[in-house]
Image (cartoon, helix red, strand yellow):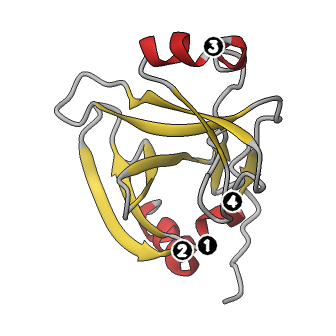
């Protein structure tokens, strides 16, 4: 499907800031376990989506699996869940396009207002996500869209409407 381009930015997606995660890689497995974190090594692609690079980790790469509060709001929709992060990867940034790692997954697109209340929701196969995002961006009260991996219920990334 051809993508419609507008003169202004429609949306931006950024991976998580790597800074708070990188020191965790130096901890022992016992120290990680005390923090509810597990060290993992990728054994399949797709299968280990990094929330910093917004890419699937190559086979054999070390990752940390840890709890992350992705929706830290004072509303009934506050949410925390497991994420994978990789060591030493740059923070991804996508403008008006979705990270390729989303294409192979079924996604839940949850749109929220500034008060952290749900205003839009879709469940779509990855290839249909772009069109669904454009539909959700039309909601006047929309502040952001959280992209969730529908099968596992894990946070993938956040979409913020363009300026």
Disc 2/disc 3 C-alpha distance (Å): 36 Å
Instruction: Please identify, in this view, whether the residue under mark 3 or under mark 1 is nearer the observer.
Output: 3
Whether 14 is drawn above or below 136: the answer is above
Nearer to me, 107 or 139 = 107
Categorize mark 4 by other alpha carbons within 10 Å: few (<14), some (14-19), many (20+): some
Q: Quadrant of the C terminus?
A: top right
Disc 4 secondary structure class = loop
Q: Position of residue 30 (x, y in %)?
A: 52, 13
Disc 1/disc 4 C-alpha distance (Å): 8 Å
Mark linked to residue 28: 3
Categorize mark 1 by other alpha carbons within 10 Å: few (<14), some (14-19), many (20+): some
Q: Quadrant of the N terminus?
A: bottom right
Q: Position of residue 145 (x, y in %)?
A: 44, 50
Q: Residue at x 77, y 62 (%)?
A: 7
Regarding residue 71, the answer to whether it shows in the image is yes
Regarding residue 139, the answer to whether it shows in the image is no
Disc 3/disc 1 C-alpha distance (Å): 34 Å
Whether 39 is drawn above or below 35: the answer is below
């Amino acid at each position: 499907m051809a993508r419609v381009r507008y003169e202004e930015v429609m949306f931006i997606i950024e991976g998580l800031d790597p800074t708070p995660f990188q020191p965790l890689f130096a901890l022992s497995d016992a120290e990680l376990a005390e923090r509810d974190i597990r060290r993992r090594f990728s054994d399949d692609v797709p299968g280990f989506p990094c929330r910093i690079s917004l890419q699937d980790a190559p086979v054999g790469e070390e990752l940390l699996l840890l709890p992350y509060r992705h929706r830290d709001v004072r509303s009934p929709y506050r949410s925390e869940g497991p994420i994978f992060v990789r060591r030493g990867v740059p923070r991804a940034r996508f403008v008006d396009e979705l990270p390729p790692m989303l294409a192979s997954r079924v996604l839940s697109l949850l749109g929220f207002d500034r008060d952290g209340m749900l205003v839009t929701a879709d469940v779509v196969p990855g290839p249909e996500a772009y069109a669904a995002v454009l539909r959700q961006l039309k909601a006047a009260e929309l502040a952001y869209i959280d992209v969730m991996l529908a099968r596992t219920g894990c946070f993938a990334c956040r979409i913020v409407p363009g300026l």
